[in-house]
Amino acid sequence: MKATPLSNFSQWAKRATQGLALAGLVAMTMSTSGQNSMQGVPPSAESQVTFQNYREQPFSQWAFRNAAAPMNAVMIPRQGGIHQFEPGNIPDWDAPAFDKVFADNYADGVIVIQDNRILHESYFNGLNRHTQHIWFSMT
């Protein structure tokens, strides 16, 4: 049986030890119809992101990077230093295949942390480590 990126990840996940944090920053991209959100000035009614639709495709990609808008909240910049993780790695694993699983499922990024070390960190769809984004799937 040929190993798939998902089965490789599943095998790796089973071997992972305690203290592992895996965060997937998930956001849907354009729908298959090609509809974009928040188009026009002001945005058309059909493209507006609201509290009712912010978790639905195609609105979620814009909403997850602008979470304060549909939730009528104010984003307050954090103060102080940022925790510095040590670099690390995961031996004998296929990082491109791992990333492909997330990229193919509309994730904007993924980070694997274990014992105060960043073992893997990748971003997709124009996201980077400094981009504001709502968090999901943190374990």
Image (cartoon, helix red, strand yellow):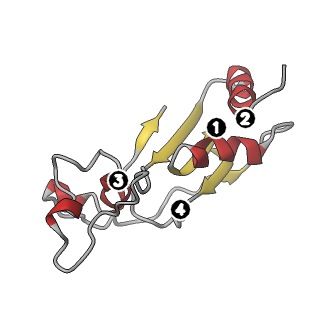
**Mark 4: secondary structure:** loop
Q: Position of residue 116 (x, y in %)?
A: 62, 43
Q: Earlier in the sequence, mark 1 or mark 2?
A: 2
Q: Is residue 139 above or below residue 130?
A: above
Q: Nearer the viewer, residue 123 or 78?
A: 123
Q: Which residue is mark 3?
A: 58
**Badge 1 is on which residue?**
114
Q: How many marks?
A: 4
In three-dimensional space, the C-alpha distance between marks 4 and 2, rounded to whole angstroms, equals 20 Å
**Residue lying farthest to the bottom in this orientation:** 41
- Tell me residue 2's x, y (percent): 84, 25
In the image, which is nearer the foreground, mark 3 or mark 2? 3
Q: Measured from the top left, where is residue 121 in percent x and y?
A: 64, 52
Res 101 → quadrant: top right
The residue identified by callout 4 is: 125
Q: For the residues marked 1 and 2, what is the alpha-carbon distance in whole angstroms?
A: 21 Å
Q: Please state the horizontal and vertical placement of residue 106, each as a whole percent of the image.
A: 51, 48
> Reading the chain from its start, which is encountered first: label 3 or label 4?
3
Label 3 Cα crowd, 10 Å radius (few <14 / some 14-19 / many 20+)? many
Quadrant for residue 44, please give it: bottom left
Name the secondary structure under disc 1: strand
Which residue in the protein does label 2 denote?
5
Does residue 30 appear anywhere in the picture?
yes
Residue at figure coordinates x 59%, y 46% from the top left: 104
As measured in the structure, the alpha-carbon distance from the residue carrying label 3 to the one carrying label 4 is 14 Å
Rounded to the nearest angstrom, the CA distance separating label 1 from label 4 is 25 Å
Front position among marks 3 and 4? 3
- Earlier-in-chain disc, 1 versus 4: 1
Q: Earlier in the sequence, mark 3 or mark 1?
A: 3
**Residue drawn at x 33%, y 52% as measured from the top left:** 60
